[in-house]
Amino acid sequence: MCLLYLLSWSCNPSEKGKKAGTPNIVILLADDLGYGDLACYGGDAATPHLDQLAREGIRFTDFHSAAPNCSPSRAGMLTGRLPGKLGIYNYLPIGHPMHLPSEEITIAEIAQLQGYATAHFGKWHLSTLNADQNLAQPQPVDQGFEYSLGTSNNSMPSHLNPTNFIRNGSKVGEMTGYSCQIIVDEAKTWLTSLQPQDPFLMYLAFHEPHKKVASPPELVNKYDHVSKPDAEYLANVENMDLAIGRLLKYLDEHNLTENTLILFASDNGSYRKGSNGDLLGGKSFVYEGGIRVPGILRWPEVIAPNQINHSPTSLIDIMPTICDALQLPYPGKEAVDGTSLFPLFNGEEIIREKPLSWFFYRTYPQLALRHKNHIILASGLDTSHHTHPFAHDDMSYIKNLTLEEYELYDLNQDVEQSQDIFTDSTAPTELMMSFAQNRLLEIQKIGPTWNDLPESVGNKKLKSEWRQLRPKGFSN
């Protein structure tokens, strides 16, 4: 999977200008937003613009992240591949050797070779953004984004007046305002630089509502019926919705709405109790609360409005969906793990060649795999401890992990995952165990081995401690 392979199927990569029926693409990704946060999902935050986006397209009730943690999920979305196969096993601390390898093909690279203008705004978290060029890790421009304003990880010191943005390799310094509004301002400015005939792909990766939260006081005051931390959080979600509303208004005013495919989702479940609805667990867990997230698609020229879809779907499906939207073959079909969502646009079912799955070595269980309405969760007999960042001992642990303990749930009957049916004679136990074991072996075989990792220091949790967290489902 390299540039030569891309060039072998790209169509006139140097030719600018919109081809007939070529959609613009906008990806809106929240950070740590829970399944139950948006008003259209029954949440307490005021989100009128996202609610309208859902009414004008498809709102998915069974949509998932690619992983229960930031960096792996983003890598899976951009490539259509399982994060474990990419070697993105955990979030990326700044300066950490792990990163998205440059040879992996992203949706931005595909679009760019079809004459698209491409841009990234907000949280990157797939390598360290390096203004000094001393760390030889791929930058957004190396992954297909010709323009970028973003941060390596979170906005610092908070969402308000962030100081760590980097624009196209250069440090910006302190920026005035809230992060979500800043990146929408930048996106609008970038759009004005394009020619009317230029198709575009924009990836807006919001920092909200990841900690450390900062929200406009006038929005916080609207939620005076809840605790101050909850009010700050809900106002944070609303502020992101207001920023998205400004972008949607720009698209309307410039006649860009009809032929623009927009995805809104979250990178994983929330760390906040109450944000994941009735789902078990939260961020960093492969229970539904850590991986089931809001998912909205709008494309007025193709997708009929007012649809609610219950098909199991995922961020891993976005790469093949965009390939279909651009009428292109997948870059190495056997390597892509997602499935195009295009059949759903016509009221048909999608048929998966590869089951959806999620892997996160640091919590318990470590692997989840979905087959139709059933999900199996599996774990090794783990007596070791794991630090919060990815460390030296963790690499060996991943490569040698064997699955020994299982849970099985029928999500059509038990979305809360309260009744383990693993020993039920009518359950597809053996089939699901085989799927799970094969998926782990696949990750272990294909996933890169990282060298020069830091030693295991810092926050540690034993397997027994993760088990105690299970009813609440929240990690640090």
Image (cartoon, rainbow, N blue to C red):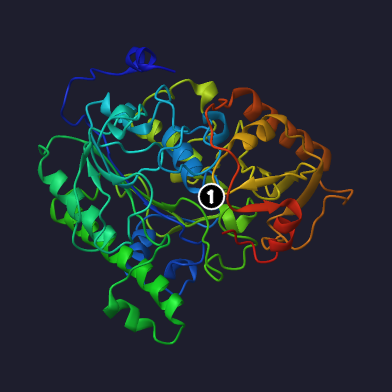
- Residue 376 lies, with reference to residue 227, above or below; the image says above
- Residue 87 lies, with reference to residue 283, above or below; the image says above
Taking the spot 43% from the left edge, 70% from the top edge, the residue there is 39
The quadrant of the rendering that contains the N terminus is top left
Taking the spot 35% from the left edge, 16% from the top edge, the residue there is 3
**Residue type marked 1:** His
Give the residue at mark 1. 64
Q: Quadrant of residue 190?
A: top left
Residue 450, horizontal then vertical, whole percent: 54, 27
Residue 343 can be seen in this image = no
Which element type, helix, strand or loop, lies under badge 1? strand
The quadrant of the rendering that contains the C terminus is bottom right
Q: Quadrant of residue 219?
A: bottom left
Q: Is residue 205 left or right of residue 425?
A: left
- Say which of 140 and 160 sits in front: 160
Residue 458, horizontal then vertical, whole percent: 58, 50
Taking the spot 40% from the left edge, 26% from the top edge, the residue there is 105
Residue 34, horizontal then vertical, whole percent: 50, 62
